[in-house]
C-alpha cells in the first residue's frame, strides 16, 4: 500500500530529467537534502510563475537551485531571477546546475547576506520566494515588501515548521519563534491578502494590495 505522499506524487506531472539529476545529486552530496523543494512544491512554484508571468523574480535561499529552475520557467522573455545564497561553498555546484539546465542567462546568483543584498536592488520584482534562515523571516519580509510591485506575490516556505508553530517553543528555539512571528506579521498586515497552504512543510502565499 502506498502513502498519501506517494499517491500525490504519482498524480503530478513528472520532473524534468535535469531535476531528477539534481535531486539525486543533492541527496548524494549535501548533508540536508530535505531542504530541496522537491517535485510537488517545485511544480506548484512553476505554475505560480507561469500564471504570474513575471519579468523579475527574487529568491532568498538558493540551496542547489531546484526552486530557482522551477520559478524561471514562467519568466517573460528577457526576464531574470535574482537568487541569493548565504553559503559561498554552494556557488560552484549551483552554477554547474544552472549551466546544465541551460538557464544561466536567466539567473543572477548573489552570494552573501540576503538582507544586505536586497537593500542594494534599485528595481522591483513581480514575485518573491523566501526560503532562507527561518530566524530572519520577519526581517526578510519587511525588506522584500517594498521591492514587490503592487499586485505582486510573496511566497514563503516552511511556515508550518514540522507543526511546531502550534506549540509553545522553547526559549532557545529561535527558528520556530521566527516563523511564528512572520506568520503573525503577515496575518495582521493590512497591506496584503494571504493564504497558508498545508503543502509539504507549509507555504504562505501573500498578495500585495
Image: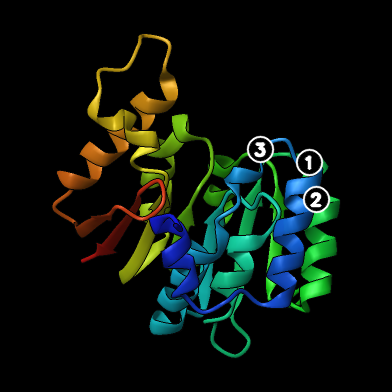
Mark 2–mark 1 contact, CB under 8 Å? yes
Of label 2 and label 3, which has the lower sequence position?
A: 3
Indicate whether 10 appears above or below 112: below
Give residue 192's quadrant in the image: bottom left
Residue at 41% in and 74% down:
48
Q: Is residue 29 visible?
A: yes
- Toward the front, the furthest residue is 1
Indicate whether 74 appears above or below 192: below
Label 1 sits on a secondary structure element that is helix
Query: Can you give x and y, in whole percent of width and height, for residue 112 in the image?
Result: 69, 41
Pick the front one: 184 or 158? 158
Indicate whether 91 appears above or below 7: above
Q: Which residue is identified by label 2?
A: 91
Query: Can you give x and y, in whole percent of width and height, for residue 32 in the image?
Result: 66, 38
Q: CA distance from mark 2 to mark 1?
A: 5 Å
Residue at 75% in and 41% down:
30
Q: Which residue is identified by label 1?
A: 88
Query: Closer to us: mark 1 or mark 3?
Result: 3
Q: CA distance from mark 2 to mark 3?
A: 17 Å
Q: Which residue is identified by label 3?
A: 32
Amino acid at each position: 500500500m502506498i502513502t498519501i505522499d506517494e499517491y500525490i506524487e504519482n498524480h503530478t506531472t513528472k520532473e524534468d530529467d535535469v531535476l531528477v539529476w539534481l535531486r539525486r545529486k543533492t541527496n548524494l552530496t549535501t548533508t540536508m537534502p530535505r531542504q530541496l523543494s522537491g517535485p510537488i512544491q517545485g511544480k506548484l512554484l512553476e505554475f505560480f510563475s507561469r500564471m504570474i508571468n513575471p519579468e523579475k523574480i527574487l529568491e532568498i535561499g538558493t540551496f542547489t537551485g531546484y526552486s530557482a529552475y522551477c520559478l524561471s520557467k514562467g519568466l517573460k522573455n528577457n526576464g531574470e531571477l535574482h537568487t541569493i545564497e548565504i553559503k559561498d561553498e554552494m556557488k560552484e555546484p549551483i552554477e554547474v546546475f544552472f549551466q546544465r539546465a541551460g538557464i544561466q542567462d536567466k539567473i543572477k546568483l548573489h552570494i552573501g547576506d540576503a538582507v544586505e543584498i536586497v537593500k542594494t536592488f534599485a528595481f522591483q520584482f513581480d514575485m518573491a520566494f523566501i526560503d532562507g534562515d527561518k530566524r530572519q523571516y520577519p526581517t526578510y519580509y519587511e525588506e522584500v515588501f517594498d521591492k514587490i510591485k503592487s499586485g505582486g506575490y510573496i511566497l514563503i516556505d516552511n511556515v508550518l515548521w514540522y507543526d511546531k508553530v502550534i506549540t509553545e517553543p522553547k526559549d532557545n528555539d529561535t527558528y520556530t519563534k521566527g516563523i511564528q512571528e512572520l506568520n503573525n506579521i503577515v496575518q495582521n498586515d493590512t497591506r496584503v491578502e494571504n493564504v497558508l497552504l498545508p503543502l509539504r512543510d507549509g507555504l504562505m502565499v501573500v498578495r500585495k494590495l
